[in-house]
Image (cartoon, rainbow, N blue to C red):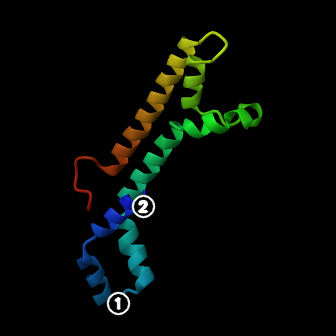
Amino acid sequence: FMILYLAGLQGIPKVLYEAAEVDGAKGWQKFWYITIPQLKHITFLVVTLGLIGTLQMFDQVKIIGSQAPLESTITLAYYVYDSAFPGASAPKVGMASAAAVILALLTLTIVLIQKKFSGEGRDLRD
């Protein structure tokens, strides 16, 4: 995520900072009134990608899942895997498929919200 922020910082026009200096803005004011507003789309993208990554978390749960009390670390992605490939018992393919559809719908909802708030189709510098 830091690479996204670095790219966003490099995309901020230097003219904005120079104009703020001419107007007498200090370092904190430039950060608050120029940097943060210019990075709001990057921040929203990072939050969206983080949420989607959290929904799809699997490997950490697989590694520590048997150590957690009362399956407290189970995520939806791990539930899909565990239902489809339970090991000794019979697989619950229907439950796994339903959970996978719910996971896909949650991910799609997050993406659509991100597209709506990012203003897809218009100039992002507005």
Q: How many marks?
A: 2
- Residue ID for mark 1: 24
The amino acid beneath tag 2 is Met
Q: Name which residue type carries label 1.
A: Gly
Above or below residue 23? Residue 95 is above
Residue located 23% across and 78% down the image: 15
Dot 2 or dot 1, earlier in sequence: 2
Q: Measured from the top left, where is residue 16 in percent x and y?
A: 27, 77
Decide which of 22, 97 is in the foreground and name it: 97
Compared to residue 31, the image places residue 55 above or below, namely above
Tell me the residue that label 2 is attached to.
2
Looking at the image, residue 123 lies above or below residue 15: above
- Which residue occupies 25% across, 77% down? 14
The residue lying at 27 percent from left, 66 percent from top is 11
Percent from the top left, x then y, of residue 116? 35, 44
Q: Residue at x 54, y 18 (%)?
A: 96
> Of all residues shown, which one is farthest toward the top?
90
Q: Is residue 116 left or right of residue 92?
A: left
